[in-house]
Amino acid sequence: MLSGFFVSAGSRSSKIGGVHRVFVYGSLKLGFLHHQELADAECIGEAATARGYRLVVFGEYPALVPGGSGVVHGELYQVSDLLLGRLDRFEEVPS
């Protein structure tokens, strides 16, 4: 399992070599309701945040925020610019 991957609330990614790495921790995970949105993505594997993050309810959705002493488990995906844009629209991330 990968660990120490820094993410913050909302849909965030890091760009490395022309592709984005996206950490998912909710309904986009394998086996969950919206995983099909990642059909064109490459799964890198299971991952976790560094210590000091937690999930809170933000409206209807979970949000990843700093605080606490735990880690949040999820999955890490590699996505293109095009797919990142589609995910941002799906997740209603302001542009």
Image: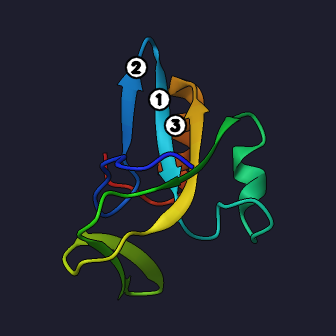
x, y percentage for residue 53? 28, 70
Q: Quadrant of residue 50?
A: bottom left
Q: Residue at x 37, y 46 (%)?
A: 5
Q: Residue at x 44, y 79 (%)?
A: 62
Q: Is residue 65 left or right of residue 16?
A: left
Mark 2 or mark 3: whose residue is earlier in sequence: 2
- Residue 84: mark: 3
x, y percentage for residue 10? 36, 61
Numbered disc 2: secondary structure: strand
Q: Nearer the viewer, residue 47 or 61?
A: 47
What kind of residue is marked 3? Leu
Which residue bears the numbered disc 2?
Answer: 16
Question: Of discs 2 and 3, which sits in the foreground?
Answer: 2
Mark 1 or mark 3: whose residue is earlier in sequence: 1
- Residue 31: mark: none
What kind of residue is marked 2? Ile
Measured in 3D between alpha carbons, the distance from the residue under mark 1 to the one under mark 3, in whole angstroms, is 7 Å
Question: Of discs 1 and 3, which sits in the foreground?
Answer: 1
- Residue 20: mark: 1
Binning the other alpha carbons within 10 Å of mark 2 as few (below 14), some (14 to 19) or many (20 upward) gives few
From the viewer's perspective, is residue 29 above or below residue 58? above
Measured in 3D between alpha carbons, the distance from the residue under mark 2 to the one under mark 3, in whole angstroms, is 13 Å
Residue most extreme to the top: 17
Measured in 3D between alpha carbons, the distance from the residue under mark 2 to the one under mark 1, in whole angstroms, is 6 Å
Q: Residue at x 43, y 69 (%)?
A: 72
